[in-house]
Amino acid sequence: MSFLAYPSTTEQKELLALAGELADIFAQRASEHDWEGRFPVENFKDLQKAGYLSLSIPRDLGGQGASLLDLVHAQYRLAQGDASTALVACMHLMHIGRLVEDRTEHPEPILRLCQDVIEHGAMINSAVSEPATGSPSRGGRPQTTAYRQPDGSWQIRGRKNFTTGSHALSYFIVGCSIEDQAGTASGLAPLTAERGNFLVPSNVQGVSIEDTWNTVGMRGSGSNDLILDDVHISPESYLDVLVPTEPSIQTKQGVWGLVLAAGYLGIAQAARDEAIRFAQTRRPNSLKQSIATVPHIQDKLGKIEVLLLESQAVLFGLAEHYTEDNQHVDVALIGAAKYLAVNNAIQIIDLAMRVVGAASLALTSPLQRYYRDIRAGLHNPPMDDVALSALAKRALGPEVL
């Protein structure tokens, strides 16, 4: 296979064709959704109908059984149509993948979740960020608290923000501090964890969404606040017991960040394509040919190609390596791929706007939307400083860890 020659299998070709069809449909709606700041409900109906939401569910559970490399390419293509929709889909696919990967047995609640995805288009995402603590990747203790009851059930109170896809979600993975209100008379084993993750259905009493999302980028992602007002859930909703975070599995969880990085690089690809289209068709009366013949335009387009190629090589290469050998994962390199994808994409979009000029600022141009959407990537973990620190420690050796 030649360098970066994808798709390379029949399955990849079919999946990329599907992602392309969906992306082209979503692109036609993207400007309106962005302008209105409206959640694109119809896009997720299309994703459900196409079976896209079950991509990361294994075949033996009734899903599509897509590999990580397949998912990276699919999300890369989908994001070229509508980045907000791709981000919501990414979060769903990532969390399903994390719950089922490398499990020889699946507990009943996870089986029901997968079946709900396949049959009804159910979607899931985590709800972990909070106004007071920010991203949990920085180590803050959640103020949202799960209180264990005498019968082993849980009562949750709190508020989460940045809950991407909020109105489309059937389930939330809620990160909580833990307090034990069961008492010794309950006969329950003492709790050893101070925090944990809980699977909370959206239809449980006390769960509500507050429409707080009003930003300049990813306006259609519906990343609103999740309110948990004395939400009562069953004992089996405690995910960390239901799906233990075994060290061998936990180490590999970060690899799903490649799916996230693919979406952000997809925005850059869309910007590159728009710049190429403009350069080939724009001919001011001062020129006999299009501006594609102008040296400084070619210089900018050449720089775009280098940045895109660099990011593709790292992103697709790591995804292919993991698909072929998932036992050896270097988490620092996963962070590097995300760092390159986002920061190179920012440069690519800037160069594309320089090619197009002032016309790129028009609200009718998709470039101004790409310019705003790509900024969101800087605020998804791993943050730049964390990714760079991990790479530095990898180079310096274990004595600095």
Image (tube, helix red, strand yellow):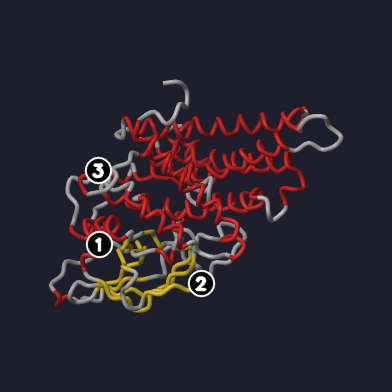
Tell me what residue is drawn at x 22 percent, y 72 percent. Answer: 153
In the image, what residue type sits under mark 1?
Answer: Thr
Image disc number at residue 211: 2
In the displayed structure, 20 sits above or below 218; it is: above
**Does dot 3 land on a helix, a strand or a loop?**
loop
Mark 3 Cα-neighbour bin, 10 Å: few <14, some 14–19, many ≥20: few
Residue 271 is left or right of residue 249, and the answer is right
Nearest-to-viewer mark from 2 and 1: 2
Q: Position of residue 121 (x, y in %)?
A: 33, 59
Q: Which mark is residue 218?
A: none
Label 3 amino acid? Asp
Figure label count = 3
Residue 102: assigned label: 3
Q: Name the residue under label 1.
A: 192
Residue closest to the eye, 212 or 24: 24
Residue at 13% of width from left, 72% of height from top? Answer: 187
Gap in angstroms between the C-alphas marked 2 and 1: 36 Å
> In the image, is residue 175 above or below residue 345?
below
